[in-house]
Image (cartoon, coloured by chain):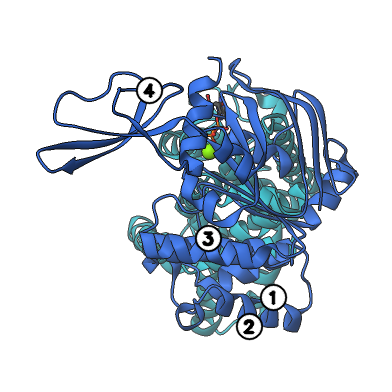
Chain colours: A cyan, B blue
């Protein structure tokens, strides 16, 4: 597992295309959300609260960067077969599930590095311009709770998805899924967005870090379908969301392994 | 590591009967596996490597039953496998790639790994290219990386699937010579459809045709199959119509043919000394269809 983790990380992090696509998307993101990204606030409060600023920063990078993340992971699992390296790996005594886990961790970690850089880089800039060192502490609290669980799930999805279809249509579907299941308003159509199955970070922001929007609690939307999946935000629900993300991740990896074992002979 | 195969069949999901009741015993040393395209060589080798589950029959390698989890692991620890269509990660250097495979093979000590990789890179004469990315390697160089990765764990069983296909003559000869040096007390199973490779390296061989074993034994026995069946015909007229023409060379005003046939293909036919290739062809002529 460690070997695969190490080499998959290495091979992914050295892909020039990864840095290029992330760079371009980041520039787009900043341009589109400029006023909010400058102050790290969606309102006119100036973004002087470091906790809220870090949550806003997380929310902003989670708008577009996960698309890049998913698309860059999508070819990694099937690549071994395509390149013709899978045979010797399968013929090695290394445990197949260990190799899958190592690949998952290595690839996702490498692909998450630019997202982490963007997030923590912004935190450092914020800490300096606002003169608030606490922002760094908040960023360290926000990233693993609000960003990583979603990325963990998305990584598993993007790794395994192309077993069902070629990477190109998968990427198209993935982008569609991203908008449908994470970004659109819940009352637009039946959607997973704003539910505990959404990979975006709202339950942590509202439940764990006590963010409110115009003083309102976060939860069910008026007139939206699937409101059963939108409990009122609380610390427990935030933890539940993290649990759901991790459980989905493990489920996908297990199914992937079973699928591989079944198609072996 | 001795290979004992009995009544092995493999039917693919689509219903292709790739192996139909193979009984084969392979001792240590170089062993050739000949067969035309689609004969089932790769299927047999993938089964031995633990990549395919037999449909029926038993496979024992060094006494381990390949169909059990433990048996398979024990075999894979002692196995070096060079697949027919081996690929590499183009962005890794040869040294890095070998390091990765060595880790998968369980060679955990860093200095052990480094030493072993260094040695093998010298064995396959890639020492000076070792730190170049694999995407710049020629077909022959990649094949040598392939054999190096197979040898990392000092395997007692080495399975190489058509390793010489697509190599230029010099590289091919170098490669098969390397393989025979590797044999020693190992079992090296070499599959190919190039008869000459077997003739030059193996003492024993088996021949597969359409999923069946049609021959197993010494090279000499297969050559003997063509005894009194190889002829030279020199003619300025039409080519002989019986038997299989294996060579045709211009000769004066006419042609000189080399023909494998059970009876003289022409009145003026002269008997000729058979080669392994003639034996193989005679066998194929005689083999019952499907
Ligand atoms: N994965 C598969 N699914 C279905 N049929 C297969 C599969 N792999 C091979 N076959 C079929 O099994 C038969 C034996 O194929 P195999 O690859 O073992 O032959 P081979 O002797 O290695 O041939 P070649 O010299 O072309 O490599 C062929 O008819 C082939 O089409
Ligand atoms: Mg083959």
Q: CA distance from mark 4 to mark 3?
A: 31 Å
The residues bearing labels 2 and 1 have C-alpha atoms spaced at a distance of: 7 Å
Instruction: Pick the quarter of the image with the C terminus of chain B.
Output: top right
In the foreground, B41 or A63: B41
Q: Quadrant of ligand 1?
A: top right
The mark found on residue B176 in the picture is: 3
Both labels 4 and 3 in a single chain = yes
User: In this image, A231 relative to B199: left or right?
Assistant: right
Element marked by disc 4: loop
Residue located farthest toward the left when viewing the structure as drawn: B253
SS for tag 1? helix
- The CA span between labels 3 and 2 is 67 Å
Residue B137 place in picture, x, y as percent:
40, 67
Between the residue at mark 1 and the residue at mark 4, the CA separation in whole angstroms equals: 86 Å
SS under mark 3: helix
Mark on residue A137?
1
Q: Chain of mark 2?
A: A
Chain designation of label 1: A
Q: Which residue is mark 4?
A: B243
Q: Which disc, if any, is residue A133?
A: 2
Chain identity of mark 4: B
Q: What element does badge 2 sit on? A: loop
Q: Residue A140 appears at what percent x and percent y?
A: 68, 71
Proximity of marks 2 and 1: CB atoms separated by less than 8 Å: yes
């Amino acid at each position: 597992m460690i070997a695969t983790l190490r080499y998959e990380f290495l091979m992914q992090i050295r892909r020039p295309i990864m840095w290029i696509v992330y760079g371009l998307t980041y520039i787009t993101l900043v341009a589109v959300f400029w006023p909010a990204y400058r102050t790290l606030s969606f309102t006119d409060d100036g973004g002087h609260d470091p906790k809220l600023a870090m949550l806003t920063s997380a929310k902003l990078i989670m708008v577009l960067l996960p698309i890049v993340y998913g698309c860059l992971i999508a070819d990694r699992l099937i690549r071994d077969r395509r390149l013709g390296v899978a045979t010797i790996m399968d013929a090695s005594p290394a445990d197949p599930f260990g190799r899958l886990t190592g690949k998952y961790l290595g690839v996702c970690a490498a692909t998450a590095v630019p997202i982490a850089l963007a997030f923590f880089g912004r935190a450092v800039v914020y800490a300096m311009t606002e003169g608030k060192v606490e922002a760094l502490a908040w960023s360290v609290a926000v990233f693993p709770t609000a960003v990583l669980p979603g990325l963990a799930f998305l990584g598993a999805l993007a790794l395994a998805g192309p077993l069902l279809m070629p990477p190109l249509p998968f990427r198209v579907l993935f982008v569609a899924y991203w908008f449908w299941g994470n970004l659109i308003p819940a009352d637009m159509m039946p959607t997973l967005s704003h539910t505990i199955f959404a990979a975006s970070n709202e339950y942590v922001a509202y439940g764990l870090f006590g963010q409110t929007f115009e003083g309102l609690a976060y939860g069910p939307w008026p007139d939206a379908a699937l409101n059963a999946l939108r409990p009122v935000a609380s610390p427990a629900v935030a933890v539940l969301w993290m649990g759901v993300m991790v459980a989905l991740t493990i489920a996908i990896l297990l199914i992937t392994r079973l699928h591989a074992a079944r198609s072996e002979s | 590591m001795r290979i004992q195969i009995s009544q092995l069949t493999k039917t693919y999901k689509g219903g292709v009967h790739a192996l139909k009741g193979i009984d084969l015993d392979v001792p240590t040393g170089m062993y050739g596996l000949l067969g035309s395209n689609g004969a089932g060589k790769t299927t047999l080798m993938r089964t031995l490597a633990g990549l395919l589950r037999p449909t029926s029959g038993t496979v024992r390698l060094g006494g381990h039953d390949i169909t059990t989890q433990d048996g398979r692991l024990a075999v894979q620890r002692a196995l070096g496998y060079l697949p027919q269509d081996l690929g590499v990660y183009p962005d890794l250097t040869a040294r890095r790639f070998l390091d990765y495979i060595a880790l998968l093979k369980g060679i955990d000590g860093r200095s052990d790994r480094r030493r072993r990789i260094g040695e093998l890179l010298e064995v396959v004469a890639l020492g000076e290219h070792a730190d170049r990315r694999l995407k710049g390697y020629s077909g022959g160089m990649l094949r040598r990386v392939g054999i190096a990765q197979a040898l990392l764990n000092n395997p007692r069983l080495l399975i190489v699937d058509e390793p010489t296909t697509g190599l230029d003559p010099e590289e091919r000869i170098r490669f098969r010579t390397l393989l025979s040096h590797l044999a020693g007390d190992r079992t090296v199973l070499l599959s190919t459809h190039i008869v000459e490779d077997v003739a030059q390296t193996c003492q024993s061989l088996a021949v597969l045709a359409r999923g069946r074993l049609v021959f197993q034994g010494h090279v000499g026995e297969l050559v003997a199959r063509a005894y009194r069946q190889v002829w030279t015909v020199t003619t300025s007229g039409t080519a002989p119509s019986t038997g299989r023409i294996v060579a045709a060379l211009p000769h004066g005003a006419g042609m000189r043919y080399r023909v494998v046939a059970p009876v003289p293909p022409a009145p003026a036919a002269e008997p000729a000394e058979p080669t392994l290739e003639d034996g193989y062809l005679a066998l194929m002529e005689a083999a019952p269809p499907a």
